[in-house]
Image (cartoon, rainbow, N blue to C red):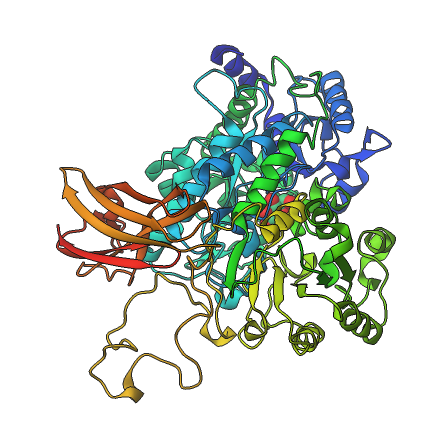
Amino acid sequence: MNETKLKQLADSLTVKEKVAQTIQLNGDLLIENDVMNTGPTKELGFSDDFDLSAIGSIYNVNDPQKLYKIQQKIMAESKHKIPLLFMSDVIYGFRTIFPIPLAQAGSYDFELIKEAAQVTAKESYLSGLHVLFSPMLDLSRDPRWGRVMEGPGEDVYTAKEFAKQVVDGYQGDLSGDVVPENHVGACIKHFAGYGAPEAGREYNTVDMSNQRLFNEYLPPYQAAIEANCLLVMTAFNVLNGVPSTGNRWLNRDILRERFGFDGVLVSDYAAIEELQAHGFTKNQKDTARKAMEAGVDFDMMTPVYANSLEALAQEGPEIMSLLDEAVWRILLLKNKLGLFENPYRGLESEATGQVLTEEAKAVATRLVEKSSVLLKNEQVLPLNQQQKIAVVGPYGESKLTIGFWASVSGKPQDSVTLKEGMEQVFKQEKLSFAKGFNLFDSYEGFGPLKEGIEMLNGKIEPEAALYQQALATCADADVIVVTFGEQFLESGEGASKTNLQLPEKQKRLIKGLAALNKPIVGILYTGRPLVLTDIEPYFNSLLLVWYPGTMGGLGIANLLAGKAVPSARLAMTFPRSEGQIPLYYAQNSTGRPAVDSTHSTRFISKYSDETNEPLFSFGHGHSYGTVSGNWQQVTEAETALQFTYQLTNQSDWQLETVVHLYVKIHAASIVQPVKKLVLSEKIVLTAQENKTAKFTLPKAALSYYDNAGVKHAAAGEMTFYLSTVNSEDSLTINL
Ligand code: BGC
C-alpha cells in the first residue's frame, strides 16, 4: 500500500480503534473452537465492550491452519480489514531446532549462524509467522541467571556479530518495499541490560555505570539496529532506578534518537502493567501515560492501554499524538510485511507448513559439530571403530535435548537421540547403553504433560538399580561415554540458581565409573556454565554440547568418531566456584592485581579460599590437533591496522581453527579491560599446513565511551594478543 493510502487508513481510525491496534495478546486466549473468545481477556481486565477483532497482533500460535482461520476471520469481521500481525517466541529454530544461542555463538562461524537463521525464517514464514521474538542480545556474565542460554554470552564483539547475522538471516534484503518471501521481521530483546540482574536472580534490578552500559551492554542491541531490525522488545528490569519499559531516556533518547531506531517497540509480557508493581506509577492511567511517553508501541498481555489510552488521548493532545505515532509505526510494519496486499503471507505457498527438510537438518547437524566445545582431551577422543563403547547416562536415549525455549514451536520427538546418532556412525555391536540415573527426580510437576514427558524420556526407575546396571554395562567396555548435566527446565526464563554444581547422584555415578579405571569421556548437556571443579578431574575428555537441538545425536556422534573435528570456543566462562561470580574474561585490572603486585600477599585482589582463575575461561576449547600462531608484522594505515601472522597446524588433521585477536589498551580516561576481543576469524588448515593470514582491524573498533556516553579514540601503548586454541602470542605497539 502506498504511504498516502496508509495515511488515509490511519486517519480513518477512531481513537478506540487506534488503541486496539496497540494491543498484543497471546493467540491461545483468542481461540476456542476457532472463534474469537472474550472470556480470558475479561479475566485479564479488559472491558466487556473491547473489540477483539480490532487488535493489532497475536503471538505464539504456530499452526498455519489456525493462523489462516484467524486471519480470515479478522478480514471478514473487522471494520477496517487491517490484518493481524503474527509474532512468536521462535528463539533458535522453528521446528528444526538448532543448538542454543550460547552454543552457536561459540562456533564463531557467523556464516553458519546466518544460514541457521535463514532456515528458521523460512520455516516460520511458511508457517504463517511475520515476526520472531529474537535474537535475545542481553550480554550475560552471571551463570546463575537461567536465561544465559538464550543469548550469545559474555563478550561484546561476539554478541555484536551474532546480532548482525541473525537479524540479516531472518529479514533478508530489506531494500525493496516488502520483507522478502521466506523471511520474517526480527524483534531483538530485551532493551536494555536485562542480562545483568543483581545476584543473577530473574527479573531483579539492574544497576550499572553509564560507561559499562555504553561500552558493553548496549552495543549488541545497537549492532542489530544498524542491521535494520524491524522491532525491539523492552525489558522487565529496572535500569539505574527506572524500569526499562517506562524509561523515556532509554527508549526515546538512546534507542530512537541516538541509535536511529524507527521500528516498533513491543513491551515484554505484562511489563507495562508491572510499572506499577515496580512502584514507578500510581495507577493504570499513570502507567499508560508513562509507557506511551517512553515510546512503547505495543502493550503485550495487559489491559493498560486498552482501558486507559482512549481517555488519556482525549484529555490531551500530547498523548493523542504519541498514540498516532505508535499506530503509524505498527501500520508501517504491517505494510513492510506486505500484509495489506496479502494478509496470508506464507500461508498460501505450495510449501506452506514445510519444516525439517534435509537441507535444514544438514545445517543443524553442522552447527552442532561447530558449537560443541571440547573442554578437555587426554587423547581419548576421537573414539575408534574397534573400541567397545559403553554409553551411560540419560541423554543416551532421551529426546529432551532442545532446551527450554524451543518448546513453543519445536517438538522434542523430532530429535535424533545420541543412541540413534551413534548407531549411524559406529558399529552397532560395539555399542551398549545404560541410563545411569533419572534425568528428573519426578514427573509430578508436569500435570497433564506428564505422560508425554514420560514417553520422551522414559519412566522413572529406582536410582540404585540404574547405578548397578550402568557399572555392569561398562564391565567389558574399552571406553565409557557418560552423558550428564541439566534437564531442560533447569535453565531458560525463571530458572535462576544459587548452586551450579551437579546433583549428588550424577557425581556419584561419574566417580563410580571412573573407579573402573577405563578411559572416560563426559558429554555435558546444559543451558549455562556449571561449577565442575571437583568432577572435571574424573574425565579424560570432556565435550560440552549445551542443548544441541534436533540433530544433536548425529552431530555429537560425528565428533566422537572424528568425522567432524571440534573447533568451538566458550562464549561464556565456567567459574571454579559460585563465589567468584560474576567472573568474565574482560574484567578491569585492579590497582592490586593478584599477579605482579608489589603489595604483600594479603593485600592484593584475591580470595583466601579460591584462586581468581576460572575452571574454563571464555575462549577456551580444544581440537583434535594443535595450532600455533605467531605475529609476522603489523602495519598502520589511516583508519585501520593490518596484522600479518603465521599459523602452523601441528597435527595430521584438517583443522578449522578459530583465531581470536584481543587487545589491552594500557592507558585511557576510562579504565580498560585486561583484555577484550576485537576480531575473530575461522581459518582452515590442512594437515601440517603453515599458512600466513591477515587481520584488518578498523581503528574505530578500539574506541570506547566515557560515563557521559562520549566516544574516545584509543591511543598510545596497546598490546595485541593473537590467540589460537593452544597458543597466545603478544605484540605491543604505540598508536
Ligand atoms: C519473555 C520474552 C518473551 C515473552 C513472550 C516473556 O516472559 O521475557 O522473552 O518473548 O514472554 O512470550
Residue placed at 75% from the left, 31% from the top?
A: 63
- Left or right: where 257 falls relative to 81: left
Query: Farthest residue toward the front?
Result: 386
Give the quadrant of residue 312.
top right
Relative vertical location of residue 80 with respect to residue 241 in this rendering, above or below:
above
Q: Looking at the image, is 462 positioned above or below residue 246? A: below
- Along the horizontal axis of the image, is 36 left or right of 347? right
* Res 540 → quadrant: bottom right
Snapshot quadrant of residue 636 = top left
Quadrant of the frame with the N terminus: top right
Q: Position of residue 298 (x, y in %)?
A: 57, 37
Q: Position of residue 176 (x, y in %)?
A: 46, 16
Q: Nearer the viewer, residue 218 or 475?
A: 475
Residue 628 left/right relative to 419:
left
Say above or below: 452 vs 144: above
**Residue 649 shown left or right of residue 173 in the figure:** left
Q: Could you tell me which residue is drawn at 66 percent across and 26 percent down?
A: 84
Residue 285 is at least partly visible in this image: no
Viewer-side residue, 676 vs 68: 676
> Total label count?
0
Q: Nearer the viewer, residue 38 or 487?
A: 487
Residue 93, can we see it? yes
